[in-house]
Amino acid sequence: MQSKVSNIQKPEATALKGFEWRNYIVYFAFIGVLIYFSITLSDEGFLTSGNLLNIVRQTATISLMALAMTFVISTGEIDLSVGSIAALSSLVGALAIQAGYGIVGGLIGGVSTGLVVGLINGLLVTKVAIPSFLVTLGTMGAVKGFAMWITDTAPVPIVDANFNFIFGSGDIGPIPVLLIWTLVFTIIAHVLLRKTAFGRQVLATGGNENAARFSGVKTMKIKLMVFLGTGLMAGLAGLLYAGRMNAGRFSFGEGDELSVIAAVILGGTSLFGGVGTIIGTIVGSLMIGTINNGLIIMGLDVSQQMIIKGIIIILAVAFGKKAMKR
Amino acid sequence: MEQPILEMKNISKAFNGIPVLRDVNFSVKKGEVHALMGGNGAGKSTLMKILTGVYTADSGDILIDGKPVSIKSYEEAQKNNISMIFQEFSLIPTLTVAQNIYLTREKKTSLGLLDDKDCEKKTEKLLEELGVDIKPTDIVQNLGVGYWQMTEIAKALSQEAKILIMDEPTSSLTKNETEVLFSFINKLKAKGYSIIYISHRMDEIFEICDRITILRDGRYITTETCSETDLDTVIQHIVGMEFDQAFEWKERAYATDVQPIFEVRNLTAGIVQDINLKIQPGEIVGIAGLMGSGRTELLRSLFGIDPIENGEIYVNGQKQKIKNPRNAIDAGLALIPEDRRMQGLVLEHSVKDNMILPILSKVKKGTFIDNKKSNDISNKFVQKLNIKTDHIFKQARLLSGGNQQKIVLAKWLANDPTVLMLDEPTIGVDIGAKTEIVEIIREMAETGKAILVVSSELPELLALSDRVVVMHDGKIKKEMTRKEIKTEEELQYAIQGF
């Protein structure tokens, strides 16, 4: 029996080769980008600790949303509404503070805004069975419209210094609070995906939804949860925008869905579901932040940055597809 | 007498008033491999769906260890220690073996986190017990198909399954993998597990099974002990004595002394190996064989879907280069595929749009589609093939199975092919439409075309074919003229490879 069983060929060795290379490509790419900018931009001060911490600050919002997006994409779904949610949450948070509800009021206002949109997304995907791409394309527009409407496109300033410290520009010793936010949620997300039943069921749902259901996974509940997740984190990201810029504004988060999805895919999470990595996502996010930062220092304007980001997404997905085919 | 572990008594089930199971009895002993056999539509899968809670029986009882149980869902079946090993694998390809086996049943650490080490340890023990040489940490999609099935079985056993249902478990396995599976099944048997084994392959059944229960037309026919029966008896029970007049073979005349209209020389493509085939104008050639014998694959490669590795194809004596379906269509070939809903029709499109899809270039007027011409052609075929539709603009998905199949036929007849290939042309259509389709195929042959038909339904194959070739493991094993075949049993023998 033993000898017979080993007769069945296992294409494991060849399959794993391509797979591992793909898993680590984001790390090599990140190091490559760092080295490239360090050399070409050494005179402009790219490699100073000030600039590097700046990258972390600027990336925090993208990172937080990308962490939650990793779960959504791992189930084989997508959420395009994150940028719009961040905009609306920043405004709701700012309005709550303006109305005298304090930091806690702002937090609750911003976060629950995100949760409500996430709930709507999740229910439309699971109960009405509309593809998530279409659902979130719709809410992306609708939520953005809401954000413009509630203050008639006027920004809402936040004068609460404590809020601005906790959610934005504060430093504890040499460490920016935004780095702490990022670190804490990265650890939570990593444990959630790798070590809990919820994370396992997210990956199972994305790997083969039917098989997951037959194994007793409540796939609809899992999908609802991941959309609540992106809603929650996009809401929080909106507050971080507000804290950093000392205001709520409808234009925050514009185009962020592009950066967020790029970070997740670059990190090695499969757009087809079933495979996800939090560490990869964070590195992907930092890489996009670094590229943004480098391009700004190089003197490229927003339009040129958008072109580069678009190309990066296509390249990332192309690599992912190659790995899927093997 | 020994108490059977499972008894199904007087099970009846009807769909829309049409009975599919009538007073069926079925019982399985502990530690036996019990084959469930019967032709297409005999009721095997319905019976198993009742056992696994997918359907509920209209009447009858299920007894486990002598105690009546109620099974209304797959979960309840599992609670009663019944597990189905799915034909379409039900594993998560991106997770590891251990993660798959214990999905949703993982042990948690004191912090509420997953204890993967525990799952891996239990899996390792389980795999060792079963003698399966894979690691708990192997990712499923990196393993061979044979291992997928064993992982599924291991998963079932870890859920305390005592009765395993295996439906055509060897259909996607190589010979080698089949042998491994069989020694594995013997091991399970020795450990006291019971296995319900569904297959059309007699050689496998006689090799692995202890008893055989045969169903025909939804009725229980008999249960035989493998060591006391023989192939003859079993085949006779499966086929029965009925004879369908509509399916009677008519001897037809066609020219045998002219150049073959279609010829295949030394064709090799994937599992299809070294096929040589000549068809005269007006001749109908049937291809018989078991699932996985390469029948469908042969048609697919001839039509340019699967790449041809070696060999030549001649139409009207002219050598053809077929690299894709477009080449094949241009060479005068047409393929009516096995799955009309997936491969044959654009279900959301109208009857007309489906029909003119392959002949768009013929109904064009300049850049645009000539509406009058395409309507005329569509109407002509609706009439000719007696397609029951209100009008040609009705969505294809709204028509019945038989009428849908006729649209697929019309679609290709409109293109006036020289060689018409059909894969299971009457699968899932009612008996009336079946007869009509058989008649259409005969008419096509009368006009001097070459016809190549693949079918698992032997009566249909025998009704249509002037000649039958039998495929086995991708090769042509036997070739018989229709006159040489006396009975359906004889063809069944040839298919089984005896």
Image (spheres, coloured by chain):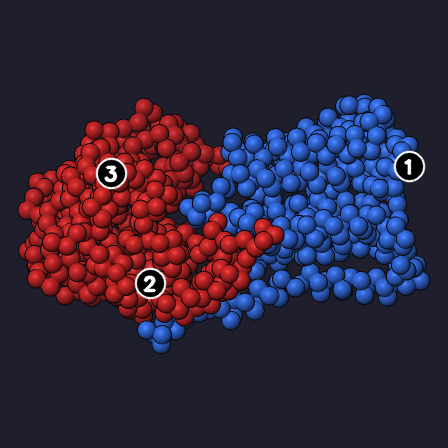
User: Label 2: few (<14), some or many (≥20) within 10 Å?
Assistant: some
- Coordinates of residue B240 in the picture (x, y in percent): 8, 48
Which of pointers 2 and 3 indicates the residue nearer the eye? 2
Q: Can you tell which mark lies on residue B173?
A: 2
In the rendered image, the quadrant that contains the N terminus of chain A is bottom left
**Residue drawn at 42 percent across, 66 percent down:** B125
**Residue drawn at 17 percent across, 41 percent down:** B9
User: Can the viewer see residue B119?
Assistant: yes
User: What amino acid is found at the position of numbered circle 3 in the picture?
Assistant: Val
Q: Residue extending furthest right? A: A43
Confirm whether circles 1 and 2 share one chain: no
The tint of chain A in the picture is blue
The tint of chain B in the picture is red
User: What amino acid is found at the position of numbered circle 1 in the picture?
Assistant: Ala
Q: Are marks 1 and 2 in contact (CB under 8 Å)?
A: no
Q: Can you tell which mark lies on residue B429?
A: 3
Confirm whether circles 2 and 3 share one chain: yes
Q: Residue extending furthest front? A: B110
The chain letter under disc 2 is B
**Residue drawn at 57 percent across, 43 percent down:** A77
Q: Residue extending furthest bottom? A: A3
Q: Can you tell which mark lies on residue A161?
A: 1
Q: CA separation, marks 1 and 2?
A: 69 Å
The chain letter under disc 1 is A
User: Label 3: few (<14), some or many (≥20) within 10 Å?
Assistant: some
User: Can the viewer see residue B255?
Assistant: no
